[in-house]
Image: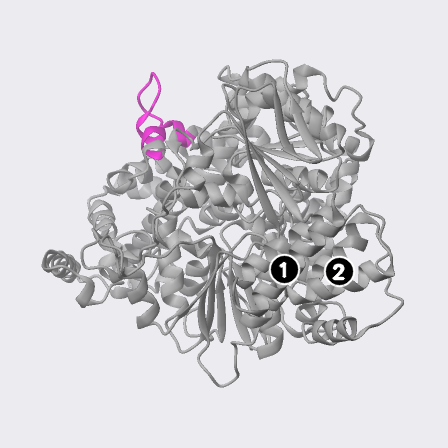
Amino acid sequence: MDRIKETADVLIDINKYKNNLIEDYILIKSVCGYFDKIKNEDLNSSDFNFLKYISNISGIPHFFDILHNRFNQSNIINNYDLNTLSSIIYESTLHTDEKNKLHKYQKIILDKFHVNSLNRFFLSASTSFGKTHIVFEIIKKMKYNNIVLIFPTIALLSENLERLISDENYIFFKENYTIHTLSEIESFGEKNLFIYTPERFLSYNEKNQHNLDFDFSFVDEVYKIDNEYIIDEETKENERDVAYRLAVYYCLSNNSDMLLAGPYIEFHLNNNPFYNNSFDNFLSKNNIKLLDFNNYEIVNKSYNVVKGAKTNSIDKNLTLNYTSKNKTQRLVQTVNQLSLLNQNSIVYCANRGKSGGVEGYALSIIDSNIFTNHNIAEYLELINHISKNFSEDWVLVKGLMNGVGIHHGLIPKYIQKEIISLFNKGFLKVLISTTTITEGVNTSAKNLIVMHNKKGNKELKKFDAKNIAGRAGRFGYHYNGRVIVIQNDFMDTINSNAEGIKHKNYDETSPKDEIDLFYSEDVYLSDNDKKIKLNILEEQKKRNLPNELFDMYKVISRLDKIKIYDQIMLLSENDLALIKKLIRTINYKMDIEYDGFQVILTTIAPIIKNKNLIFLIENKGEEGKTSTLTHLVHYYLKGGFKGSINYHLEQGDHIDKAISKTSKFAYNTLKYQVVKYLGVFNLIYKYVESVKKRKEITDVSGIDLLLLKFEYNAVTDEGRIASDYGVPSKVLSYYENPDNKVKIKQSFDDYENKIYNKINDVINR
């Protein structure tokens, strides 16, 4: 490194910034790059004075702290000149308390919130910006009474719950708020903080109407309001875009503050011939101000494309050498060479499969024997637990034995969480993942290796690509992250023109699902939309159905609810008797009567749109009587996750496939699909029975307990919190069976005991 030249370059950029010749985000990149080059140099007190100065000029004083925290530099300043003193004074203005400090651009956002004003903002920023941290500082500053934080996944819900309960830096929230994560609330505190997913927030709204209004709401990953913006078939199947739009709608329903946030969201420019004004309409109508910090990369990124050459110079610290042009072999050799530098890597794959996917590349690395001497002592208890409760032949276990982490959506949630933790602690050399790493998961990898420019079988969009690349480098750990692209067109997507985000409820030309008709103002409805809406209301009126039925399970359309009502009215006395027998069985022993369950499946089948769920209902085996779904539900209720795995093993599936099928069923099909369709049936069945018997609907027995089980995999309050947190099945069973707690706890293995001690602190908060 030529320190004189590098120092001169950064000083030139500082002067350009002071003279308004370059933007502040350009200066951040320059200063961050300088720290990256100097981090391992021999530094004296004068150097530290200078570094303190430039870190504060850039607005990121944390750059200076990282020298000590991650690179073992003493960073002690012995002599204070005027620049150093002014830097320290400026830095003090970024502290929110003794332990917490913002960077300049976080502080800009915090300063926009004022008491007795309407504070509504839409923030788009890089993955390294620290968006969630700002939220907690806003709450502390504004002293809100009732707050809802909406995250995209249960994993992030539980992560933030644990943070507020266990992290001393967040003790303010534990001391001042009653924290809620379940949709059923028995009692409220004087101040309340709710942590939800969009679906659970809607469920809360349906079950706890007129109790309290929120003073502040935060919605993370808010780009999900526009299902066309990203590539995600699973999102489409789960109608999560509808849930997100409805969650935002209800957050805006009173005169409350709000922060909507997401990474790298692009916006339509009004000078573009293809300009779509729907998102601007959304912001304007709801008094939301746009905060665009997309260019503010707090961790630099370098992009490197590995193609045909046997020697690829990446940077001054890394040259990759290859003995083969085979893509898989190049991945193995890349991972190995980075590991020899004591650097970990994330490998992005388009799919989870064994043919060119997560599990296939994992097996290739395992079979290469590059990590044969890997030390598993730190997590042997986890390996023993998984081997005993799943199988030692599972590819995930083989990976852990060799320092390879596997991460995708069909791995049990508590194991996903452990793998991320082991990777961040340095106990795993490489993490191979699909886009699950972009769902708010915090990783500490310097290197991201990109194997595909696809998500599933579809080409990535720019948003997806930037979000994936954002996993390279982590603020507080690195100054620079490397993106290494092996033989694909990922960079074409990174450099492509982005699509702007849209909001279909604010766009007259946008085709609307029936649900959106009732959440869009008339000005944004076409004449045909208005006609359809009036026809639907007429159908409701014909049957004299109350609006309350349509305020529940909002992600199911009115017409579909009317169809279910019509189907229920056609049920025979024998059908109704079978349903009542099913309800008794559920309430008595949490199992299903096949015949009664089949009646319900036949009733809901006409409104189901999810192809996988339709197949599970229509496929009835050789005897043509019992749906595959009925069998799966029975085995799941009787044997839990392990029982479902055994069912698939009995059908001849390999352990890897059996676990994937079970995960998809438990975490997707049941949790998001079956529960909402059965929920609508239950709602309308109970309404029909209440009218028939002239009873309150709350006094009619239904399949409520089954719905609770499907949504949470638990029915007790403690069990549902444990399930959200992510625990082994035996720990969950401990909370679900209060009469057998002692016996169950005595059977815990070492890993289960460790998890029990963690979750018990959360539950007994």
Q: Which residue is mark 2?
A: 51
> Could you tell me which secondary element the residue under label 1 belongs to?
helix
Residue at x 67%, y 37% (from the top left corner): 419
- Disc 1 marks a residue whose amino acid type is Ile
Point 63% across, 63% down: residue: 14
- Which contiguous range is marked in magenta? 613-630
Q: Is residue 737 magenta-colored? A: no
On residue 371, the disc is: none
Q: Secondary structure at mark 2?
A: helix
Can residue 540 be seen here? The reply is: yes
Q: Which residue is mark 1?
A: 12
Does 657 sit left or right of 61 as displayed?
left
Q: Dot 2: few (<14), some (14–19), or many (≥20) neighbours within 10 Å?
A: many
x then y, percent, for residue 720: 58, 51
Q: Quadrant of residue 235?
A: top left
Query: Which of label 2 and label 1 is nearer to you?
Result: 1
x and y, in percent, of residue 654 in the image:
55, 17
Q: Is residue 56 above or below residue 610?
A: below
Q: Is residue 629 magenta?
A: yes
Query: For the image shown, how many numbered marks are present on the structure?
Result: 2
Q: Nearer the viewer, residue 364 or 520?
A: 364
